[in-house]
Image: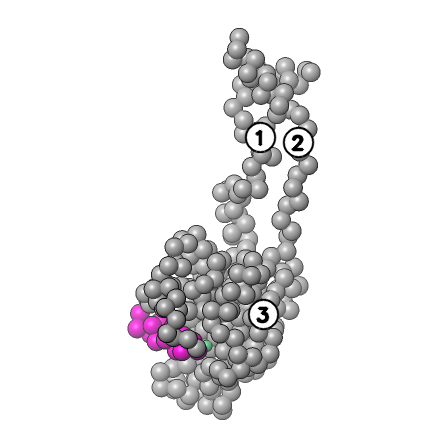
Amino acid sequence: MPALATALAAAILLASPPAPAKASRPPAYVVVLDPGHGGEKDGALSVEGRREKDITLQIARQVKKRLERQGARVVLTRGGDETVELPRRAAIANDEEADLFVSLHLNSAPGGPGTKARGIETYFLSADATDASASAVAARENADRFRTTDPSDTVGGILDDLEDQANLAESSRLAYALHGALVRATRAPDRGVKQAPFHVLAGARMAAVLLELGFVSDPVEGKELARPARQEAIARAIAAGIAAWRTAEGTAAGTAAGPAAGPAAGPAAGPVSSPAAPTAAAR
Ligand SMILES: [Zn+2]
C-alpha cells in the first residue's frame, strides 16, 4: 500500500501545527498625492490670475486629511510652493512603495484665461492620446519638463514603462472610480476618462492617474475652483473614489490568491484522499 502510506505521511505533515504566520500586511495603505506644478511653474491661470499650482496644493492638503481619517498614510510630492521635476514625482511614489499615485491638475482651454470650457477629465497613461484634446492637455502638462534632451525622458521611455499591464489595468479602474465620484460630487460636465502620454505618470510603478479637476481658465469654473466649498467637494469625492477602488481591488485580490496565501492554504487545498483524513485525526 505505498499509495496509502504516502497519503498518510502527507496527512501527518499537513496536520502538524502551522508555522507562525508571517505578520500580514498592515491595514494602512499608502497614497502619494501630487499637487501639479509649484515653484517656478505656475501651471494654468484663471482670469483673475489665480494659479493652478496654489489650488492643486490646497486640494491636495484637503484630500490628505480625509484619507488619513480613512487610515491611509499620505505623502505629498511637495508640501509647499516648491519646484519638483516631473520624474521626481513618480520616483517619490516608488520610494514610498505607494499603492496609488494621484496627480492633481486644473485644465486650461486652448484660448487661455477667459475662454469658456468647463468640466472634469480623468487620465491614465498611454503612449497614444485618446484624441486631439487629450494630446493637447498632455502637451501642456508635459511642458514642465526641464531636461527634454534626456533620451530616457521621451515618449519612447513612456512606452517602456507601459510594459506593466497589471498597473495599467489598476490605473484604469482607479481612473473610473475617481472620475465617477468627482462628476457626481461637483456636477461639473463629464468630459470622460481618457488616456495620454503624461510624463509625470510614466515612471510610477503602481496604479497612477492624473485628474484635471476643472477649467481654471473658465470665467465661472475658475472662480468656483478657488472656493473652499468646491475644493472640499473635490477632496471628499477623491477620498470616496479611492475608498471605492480599494474595496473593488480587495475583492479582486481575494479571488486572485496572492502570494501571501501560499502555505497557509495547505490542508484545504491539498490532494489528500478522504480515507487518510480520519486516520490522521485519530493519531
Ligand atoms: Zn497642470
Above or below residue 281? Residue 104 is below
User: Are dots 3 and 2 in contact, CB under 8 Å?
Assistant: no
**Secondary structure at numbered mark 3:** strand
State how far apart marks 1 and 2 are (Cα): 9 Å
**Secondary structure at numbered mark 2:** loop
* Residue denoted by label 3: 76
Q: Which of 177 and 12 is in front in this view?
A: 12
* Residue denoted by label 1: 266
Quarter residue 67 falls in: bottom right
User: Are dots 3 and 1 in contact, CB under 8 Å?
Assistant: no
Amino acid type, residue under disc 2 in the picture: Pro
Q: Is ligand 1 less than 8 Å from the beta carbon at label 1? A: no
Report the magenta stretch's main SS.
helix
Task: Tell me which residue sits at (60%, 66%) in the image.
Answer: 75
Question: Residues in magenta?
Answer: 131-145
- 10 Å crowding of disc 3: few (<14), some (14-19), many (20+): many
Amino acid type, residue under disc 1 in the picture: Gly
Task: Tell me which residue sits at (49%, 90%) in the image.
Answer: 49
User: Are dots 1 and 2 in contact, CB under 8 Å?
Assistant: yes
Above or below residue 76? Residue 99 is above
Task: Tell me which residue sits at (58%, 34%) in the image.
Answer: 263
Q: Quadrant of the C terminus?
A: top right
State how far apart marks 3 and 2 are (Cα): 41 Å
- Residue 18: assigned label: 2
